[in-house]
Image (cartoon, rainbow, N blue to C red):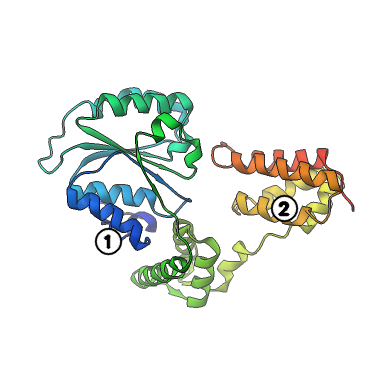
Amino acid sequence: MKRDFLWVEKYRPKTIDECILPENIKETFREFLNKGEIPNLLLTGPAGVGKTTVAKALCEELGCDYILINGSDEGRFLDTVRGQAKNFASTMSLLPSSNHKVIIIDEADNTTHDVQLLLRSNIEAFHKNCRFIFTCNYKNKIIEPLHSRCSVVEFSIKGKEKAEIQVSFFERLVSILDKEGCKADKKVLLQLINKHFPDYRRVLNECQRYSVGGSIDSAILASFSDVKVDDLIKTLAKKDFPGVRKWVVHNLDNDPAVLLRRLYDGLYQTLDGPSIAAAVLIIAKYQYQIAFVADQEINMLACLTEIMVECEFKL
């Protein structure tokens, strides 16, 4: 029997009811289960919130014959759509419980325009026996012809739902750590969950990494401490490229979106008037590119280099 080493796979929810989501979102998927049928779906929301888990759970509960293709594999993805996906979609399912086959395209926002056009054609060509579920972090990167052929479900968590969902995940996380024989400071777990909400995948991965020592305590928070950008801004002002590159390498473990946000907050007080607008446009450009660049280090370094060259500092 296969045993999953990664906790995110070992403890991945198998049903919709097991998924930690707001009740209104779960109810949408329960309606599909009650009907025994799903439309083409576009599941959109931040990383780690459970989009892929829901897609798999839907297929499993409906007894669908399905495959999952990762859209980040850009090098071969066009060939995959033309070959594997087309061959799978063009044949009827042999499973007695399955009305349709399902193709899950994970991280669809990382696919090219040409690939999305081909997927749009496949939706139309094989609609009688195959459904498509797309997951993405940024729905604006899905072309309109594909977007309009799907029912969109946004994994948004608002207001008081946030606290309820955090409590549910905290209880799930404590249960997982108990099963793995790992002691944990519950206050630390709450801090981790709050810091990375709603990216539960990251929290679980980090807990597994630190569990090797048999316990999770405040030491885990050291790697997640708030990013300090004061030294970076001084380095940028000095036009010190080697120093900037060293800072980037040192902070690679942090979320690049968080890094850019901290930089935005810090630069506002240290730039001359016209340079503030220039910095905002630069940061916005590179923050958008985070979703699909191949190398986050190069993207971050390019952003900082452009700020260093184009902006004037008060320091």
- Horizontally, residue 266 falls left or right of residue 193, namely right
Q: What is the C-alpha distance between the residues marked 2 and 1?
A: 40 Å
The 10 Å Cα crowd at callout 2, few under 14, some 14 to 19, many 20 or more, is: many
Hey, what amino acid is under mark 1?
Asp
Hey, what amino acid is under mark 2?
Leu
Q: Secondary structure at mark 1?
A: loop
Sequence-earlier tag: 2 or 1:
1
Q: Is residue 234 above or below residue 172?
A: above
What residue is disc 1 on? Answer: 17
Q: Residue furthest front?
A: 148
Q: x, y (%) of residue 304?
A: 74, 43
Q: Residue at 37% x, 60% y: name it.
A: 21
What residue is disc 2 on? Answer: 263
Q: Residue at 71% x, 38% y: name it.
A: 302
Q: x, y (%) of residue 293?
A: 57, 37
Count of numbered tags: 2
Q: Is residue 224 above or below residue 72?
A: below
Query: From where the camera sits, is residue 293 visible?
Result: yes
Q: Secondary structure at mark 2?
A: helix
Q: Is residue 84 above or below residue 153?
A: above
Q: Residue at 24% x, 53% y: name it.
A: 31
